[in-house]
Image (cartoon, rainbow, N blue to C red):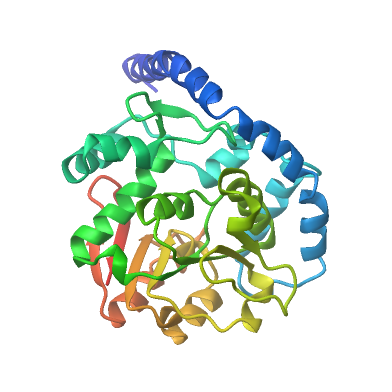
Amino acid sequence: MTMGLFMLKVISRLRKQLYLLSMIPSQVRLRCIKRDQRTIFNSLSRNFPEIYRNFKKYNAGEFTTPVWKQLNAEIEHTLLPYPSFSFLRNPLVSATMVINDFGQVLKQELAMLKNEVSRDRLKVLLKEDYVGNPLIINSTYLASHNSIHHLYHLTKFLKITKSHLDEISTVVEWGGGYGNLAKIFRRLNPATHTYIIIDTPLFSSIQWLYLSTILGPDSVKLLQNPADVVHSGKINLIPICFLDYQEISADLFVSTWALSESSKFSQDYVAVREWFKSKHLLIAYHKSSANYLPDSDRVGTLARASGALIEEIDFLPGNYYAFR
């Protein structure tokens, strides 16, 4: 590395650190506004080990890739027996579930949102929650980049497809991270709707803890055995080991990179079921990589075959949307 490149990297790191220091007052403000979430989280988290231990006796079969089996094992090690309240600051959790970009990605996503959504509305939709202790990256909206990123996906989908939220009464999300996109969708569409997240048992457990802390346990249904059923009007969390026992149909199928990081078996499973009968698709995926995720861009091929429009994400080279 030349001295010039080295200095540029040093300057970039310093700018990032200075920016984060400028966000400290916003972090403190968030903690004060939503401090009750820590008490709720601590109470609910006592149930986390038992909930997850129950899932361990079931087999997830061929749904996950070797890469994600390994990542799940590593994340499990960091979260058990009880997840930390600041679990989103854990380096491994952050690397797999969170986007923290300080460049063009944030700039372009926020610019589009400002153009499409009023300032007052953005303040409601983007205001972060204290649980997980997410990194605040915008003080005006008290927002993390993850919330900006997720609202951008949904806003882009509505704009491109010219769909309306009142057409969507049931959503199925394949791979929901820690539950943030489901939370943003509920804010965007507060009318009663059914939301279903399909994920690995570990992630379903995290989603239960996160969403129950924010929305209350009565708003979240975690399926805990094969005979359990989806509850209308709630956010339903289906561990993938119970998927074959469920009859699911929806108006919108969502997967932001999760399906492209799932096994070929999973991709075909979803496509054969016609995206769980969904009229609409909101999918983000990336190009395949031979050594890491060789089947990623199959998702685009399958979506295109079902009538989806494929659009490259210009500020994320090698990444694409599929909209229908």
Horizontal and vertical percent for residue 88? Answer: 58, 37
What residue is rendered at 56% in x and 84% in y?
247
- Relative to residue 150, is residue 155 drawn left or right? left
Inspect this view and state whether residue 63 appears: yes
Horizontal and vertical percent for residue 169? Answer: 40, 70
- Quarter of the picture containing the C terminus is bottom left
The residue lying toward the viewer, choosing from 177 and 301, is: 177
Horizontal and vertical percent for residue 235? Answer: 54, 61
Q: In the image as oriented, which residue stretches furthest toward the bottom?
A: 272
Question: Within the image, what quadrant is residue 225 found in?
Answer: bottom right
Horizontal and vertical percent for residue 52? Answer: 77, 57
The residue lying toward the viewer, choosing from 102 and 208, is: 208
The relative height of residue 152 versus residue 286 in the rendered view (above or below) is: above
- Quarter of the picture containing the N terminus is top left
The residue lying toward the viewer, choosing from 207 and 213, is: 213
Q: In the image as oriented, which residue stretches furthest toward the left?
A: 115
The relative height of residue 216 versus residue 286 in the rendered view (above or below) is: above
Inspect this view and state whether residue 105 appears: no
What residue is rendered at 55% in x and 24% in y?
31
The relative height of residue 43 versus residue 303 in the rendered view (above or below) is: above
Query: Number of callouts in the render?
Result: 0
Question: Within the image, what quadrant is residue 139 found in?
Answer: top left
What residue is rendered at 47% in x and 50% in y?
183
